[in-house]
Amino acid sequence: MTANDFIQIGIYLVVLLALIKPMGSYMTHVFADQPNRITRFGGGVERFIYRLCGIKADEDMGWKSYGIAMLLFNVCGVFLVYAFQRLQQWLPLNPQHFPALSPDLSINTAISFATNTNWQAYSGESTMSYLTQMGALAVQNFLSAATGIAVLIAVVRGFARKTTKGIGNFWVDLTRTTLYVLMPFSFVLAMLLVSQGVIQNLKPYVDVPVVQTSTYANPVTDAAGNPVKDAQGNPETKPTPLTTQTLPMGPAASQIAIKMLGTNGGGFFGANSAHPYENPTPFSNFLEMLAIFLIPGGLCITFGEMVGDRRQGWAILATMLVIFIPLTIGVTAAEQAGNPILHSLSIDQHASALQSGGNMEGKETRFGIAASSLFTAITTAASCGAVNNMHDSLTPLGGLVPMWLMQLGEVIFGGVGSGLYGMLAFAVVAVFIAGLMVGRTPEYLGKKIEAYEMKMASLAVLIPCALVVICTAIAVMTPIATATVGNPGAHGFSEILYTVTSATNNNGSAFGGLSANIPFWNVMLSVCMFLARYTLAIAMLAMAGSLAAKKHVPASAGTLPTHTPLFVTLLTCVVIVIGALTFLPALALGPIAEYLMSAH
Amino acid sequence: MSRLIRNALTMLLVMTAITGLIYPLAATGVAQVLFPHQANGSLVVRDGKPIGSELIGQSFTDPKYFWGRPSATTPQPNNGTASNGSNLGPTNSALHDAVQQRIDALHAADPSNTAPVPADLVTASGSGLDPQISPAAAQYQVARVARLRNLSVDQVQALVTQATQGRQLGLLGEPGVNVLQLNLALDGVQKR
């Protein structure tokens, strides 16, 4: 690694930590039960929305009502996004006249965006009308993020409240998140991104004449559109002059802003944040990386303030950083070392003042190794899934890091809201293990952790693990699935493992060589995304309901303090041990096998 | 339950109106006023007509131009409507062969240059539309372009410097040379 690599990681962490505290405190006010400056400021709009929707804002919901409201709202969203995609050819704002999407791709995309996954089996610039992007996909970017945050706030209320049934009102939490947190910050970020060169317009695509005409090998297709093959079975091509280039247009910045802030990650364009219109400069890249961690990091502070002990929030944040920083250094070092199979060629992969060097396949010049590797670690630690470089072309160990960060359950920052409630499930497991060691009933934040809480925490931790392992096994036994891999050998297995991992943990990034737009993947991944997202959320709401009903137990000499370095160490170990025990065998067959073969 | 369903549907419609129409249209309006050049694609305009974008790389194959990053888009390289990388795995022999071919093409264009080729000049970019190459990749090509255009190395060097963008704020990202801007400047020098 170069000094520059360390400097860029260092600057990022310093700026992030400076922003997290005010962001967290701001959100504490947004969700406070008592009216304050922020909620009074938007009170008129809020009340108007509640009246329009027939919502009783002062109704305190039990966990079941809260969960049903959440689920109903999300399912309605799935249907609406599905309809937009199927009807877009008849709707306005479709200057490129894109046709309707296939049913399986539409349902996959609808579930993907509603679950905050944003797995994309399509390429935006050649598939989606501006109306579908703005009115369906960007809307779900907001609402899935708001859903995650709302569920988290309800879970935190479960810890903070005593002997009550209510854990808040889903509609109020959803509305406040959207109005006070997501919209204003997205608007400011969108304008900053436009200043850097991200596009924001409703114009049709622009054709330009190229400066130097050239010819390219254009695959020949028959009347039915199928590729024609020659005698050897290779696709036949004919030299075609290249005289124009089509520049895509569209309302990109407004969607990209919420895509990062809401840890959604669904690109406006196929190449996502590698696209120069989606992420044009190193500064836009820096802003996008900050936006990914801003809310998940800030929510740790919000959590601490809501349970009345800021140190609890810092301890969770510290655990996340303890895992995040070494893995970031790991991916950067692997990428900076370059690709060993190219060393024998006449190629210079060394870093110097004139080039970043390293493994540049799939990376953009303006980001080089440092800003690409850092982005890779951030986007997979958080369940964002936006990419500014092609993860499929990462070195074997460089690709292992993002895969494992997702497999840890998306709790290292994780998705907005969902990352922290996932981490709280791990925290409950950690205090339980500590309780076993000394033979005491475990407590967390003044609440006794009993069998019911442990069952819910175990479900939350184990469901994604089980889904990944089982669905990967199904895929590798299915010939139509294995035929979709884009690379031979161990890397092909890595592509399948990455795909299932990403969908199940609601990340959405991809090893893009795998051709995912077939009914098998569209359907199986839809099931993974849906099950993991909502069973986990419901399990955590159930735990919150149970906790809220308990009384507060004052800390005694036998209570394990959960704000100390000791607890941070314990929690880190629990997260890593579960992640490693579950996935090491699978990882050994994929990236680790590939690494050993390439090093040989 | 029926009340919850009604709440969910109306809330979804209200939120769609706010975040799916008001928000993006307001953002478009403000962006068009504050940053019209960027919001519309940072187009390079000559004689009132767009001839490219500062941000989107074009394909250059003629040895008298600087070549950009290899592009893996299909069917043609630098396809603005199908951005993508190669997605070749690190140990895939197809990657090794593609890099070898690109090195051979550079050697064929300039047999006198035997220096190792900077990595970014022979590896496909992430978007397939990367507008930049590293300063090292530009230096690798300066002598060739100068010779084929009968310009002095110093003249070409000066144009490369003009087209070079340093690290942003002196710290972020990596320096790069905008290939379209550089090649347009080269054509401009020769017209004069």
Image: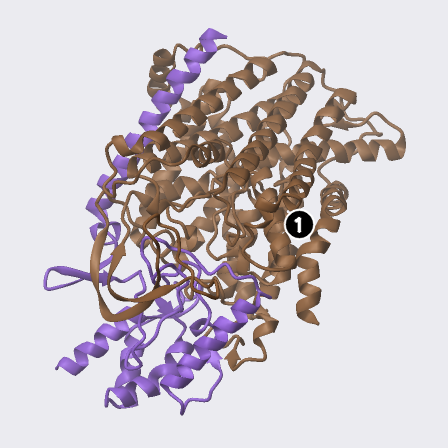
Chain colours: A brown, B purple
Q: Is residue A222 left or right of residue A583?
A: left
Please say whether residue A354 is visible from this viewpoint. no
Q: Looking at the image, which is closer to me, A150 or A100?
A: A100
Q: Position of residue A341 (x, y in %)?
A: 60, 73
Q: Looking at the image, which is closer to me, A252 or A120?
A: A120
Q: Is residue A569 left or right of residue A14?
A: right
Relative vertical location of residue A273 with respect to residue A163 in this rendering, above or below: below
Can you name the residue that lies furthest to the left here? B47
Q: Residue at x 48, y 27 (%)?
A: A29
Q: Quadrant of residue A188?
A: top left
Relative vertical location of residue A352 with respect to residue A438 in this rendering, above or below: below
Q: Looking at the image, which is closer to me, A518 or A179?
A: A518
Give the amino acid type for the residue marked by disc 1 in the picture.
Ile
Say which element carries label 1: helix
Q: Position of residue A433 (x, y in %)?
A: 81, 34
The C terminus of chain A: image quadrant: bottom right
Can you name the residue that lies furthest to the top here? B2
The N terminus of chain A: image quadrant: bottom right
The residue wearing badge 1 is A323
Q: Residue at x 33, y 86 (%)?
A: B144
